[in-house]
Image: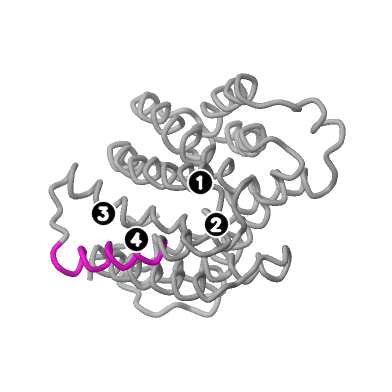
Amino acid sequence: MPAIGTSARSTFTPFDAAAGLLAVVVWGFNYVAVKAGTHEFPPLLLTGLRFLLVAALLVPFYRLPRRQWRLIVLLSSLMGTMHFGMFFASMAGLDVPTGAIVGQLAVPFSAVVAAVFYGERLGLQGLFGMFVSFAGVLLVVGEPQHADPVSLVLSGLSSVAWALSMVVIKKIGPINPLALNGWMAAFAVPQLFLLSWCLEQGQMHSFANAGWKGWGAVGYTGILATIVAYSLWYRLLARYPINRVVPLNLLNPVIAVVAGVALFGDSLSWAKVIGGTATLVGVAVLQFRRSPC
C-alpha cells in the first residue's frame, strides 16, 4: 500500500468517490446509532461492547506489533476509553445535531495540540478558523433549548482526547490500520467494562431487555462505523493526496444533523443552523490550512 497522501492521483474515480461518500454517510449516521444505543445500554457498556465486537473480528487476523504495543495500550486509553467513552456518554444527554456540531471541536483542538507538541504556527488563518469554529459551537450550546452541561463538557473533553490521540498515532508510525483498530479495541475493552462496573448501573437489565435498536447500535458502530468505514477511508488516503480526501469529512456533521432531525425529530433552530455553519466554516479553514498541497 502506498504511503498515505503521496499518490499523484488528483481526481476520484467513480468507485472511489462512492466509497468516500459511503464512509462519510456511515459516520454521519453513527451519531444516530450511538444515540439509539444509549437508550438501551449504559454508554460506557455500549462503548465496551462496540470494541469487544471489533476486537473479536480483527484480532485473530493480526499479530500485536511487538515494538508498538506500549503506544497501542496508551492509545487504547486515550482514544478507546477517553475519546469514545466520553463521546458515547455525551450523546446520552445531547440531541444528535448538537452532538455532531460540538464534536467538530476535535479539529481546532488538534490544531492547538499540533502547536504545542510540534511547534506548528497557527497564523492568522488558523486563529480565524479557531475563533469561528468555537463561536459557532457557543452559539449552538447557548440557544434557548439548553443542552445538558455535563454532556457538553464530556463532548469537549472527548475532542481533546481525540486530538491527543493523534500525537500517539504519529509516534506509532507505519502500521496496518485494521491491526491498530483491532488491538486498540482489545486493550480498551477491559478498561471500559471496569469503568462501567464502577460508574454505571443496570447492565444486566440492559442485557436482558435490549432490543434490535440496542444490539443494532453495537453492530453498526463496531462493524460499519469502525471496520468498513475506516477501511474505505484509509484506502482513499493511500490513493489520493490528503487535501483531496479530508474535505469529504465536512459532510459528516451535515448528514448527522439531517439524520437526527429526520429519525429522532430533533429540533433544527436558527441557532443550530447558523452556529453549525460557522463551525464547519472554521473547521474547513483549519483543515485546508493544515493539509499539504
Question: Which callout, 1 or 4, points to the residue nearer the camera?
Answer: 1
Picture residue at 32% right of the left edge, 55% below the top: 3
Answer with left or right where residue 149 lies relative to residue 34.
left
Q: Earlier in the sequence, mark 3 or mark 1?
A: 3
Task: Determine which residue is flagged by label 3.
Answer: 111
**Nearer to us: label 2 or label 3:** 2
Q: CA distance from mark 1 to mark 4?
A: 16 Å
Secondary element type, mark 1: helix
The quadrant in which residue 60 appears is top right
Q: Residue shown at 31%/56% (left/top)?
A: 108
The Cα atoms of the two marked residues, 2 and 3, are separated by 28 Å
Q: Position of residue 77 (x, y in %)?
A: 44, 30
Are the residues at dot 1 and dot 2 in contact (C-beta closer than 8 Å)? yes
Which residues are the magenta region? Answer: 123-137
Q: Exactly how many numbered labels are in the figure?
A: 4
- Could you say which quadrant of the image residue 123 lies in? bottom left
Residue annotated with mark 2: 146
Counting residues from the start of the chain, the first of labels 2 and 3 encountered is: 3
Quadrant of the rendering where the C terminus is positioned: bottom left
Q: Is residue 164 above or below residue 16?
A: above
What residue sits right under mark 1 in the picture? 149
Q: What amino acid is found at the position of numbered circle 1 in the picture?
A: Pro
